[in-house]
Amino acid sequence: GLGRAILPALVLEVALHYVYYHSISHNFSRIFHQFDNKVFFVPPWEVMAVAFFMLNFIYLKFLVIWRVSAAISLMDGLQAPENMRRCVCNNYSFAGFWRSWHSSLHMWIVRYAYLPLGGARARLLAVWPIFLLVGAW
């Protein structure tokens, strides 16, 4: 319920107060080119650290949105499916990431697109139209 949304919401609020994710992501190149148009070398570990924190920020933001929405739907008497079953840092394959990131969309695609297109029997033929559908969406 709402209790599952409160802790991530508080963490997000504190993170947004102390770390300026939006400014960092939109001004990353300006931060390192600010003195006389000289290009400063940015070590790869710094770029990876910024990417890691941005990915976790996006995860936390969507976690709060989906959990608050699920709590509101519970107040209306509807059980919403659990999206984001695992942390974004706990995925070791693209397939695992897709299954846990937006699991309700994944279940819908499997039921109404993948299985009718042949499922595992025609995997290569079934995956491409679904990939194009999700990409266009």
Image: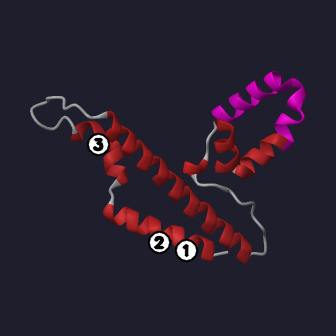
Q: Could you tell me how far apart the alpha carbons at marks 2 and 1 are, in whole angstroms? A: 6 Å
Which quadrant: the N terminus? bottom right
In the rendered image, which quarter is residue 42 located in? Answer: top left
Q: Secondary structure at mark 2?
A: helix
Q: Could you tell me how far apart the alpha carbons at marks 1 and 3 are, in whole angstroms? A: 31 Å
Residue 87 as seen in the image, left or right of residue 48: right
> Which residue is label 1 attached to?
6
Q: Nearer the viewer, mark 2 or mark 3?
A: 2
Magenta-drawn segment: 111-137
For badge 1, the amino acid type reads Ile
Q: Nearer the viewer, mark 1 or mark 3?
A: 1
Q: Residues within 10 Å of mark 1 (few under 14, many from 20)?
A: some
Asked if the residue under mark 3 is in contact with the one under mark 1, i.e. CB atoms within 8 Å, the reply is: no
Residue 70 screen position, x and y as percent: 68, 67
Q: Which mark sits nearer the N-terminus, 1 or 3?
A: 1
> Which residue is label 3 attached to?
27
> With respect to residue 71, does 137 lie above or below?
above
| Residue in the picture at 46% in, 68% down | 11
Asked if the residue under mark 3 is in contact with the one under mark 2, i.e. CB atoms within 8 Å, the reply is: no
Residue 31 screen position, x and y as percent: 22, 41
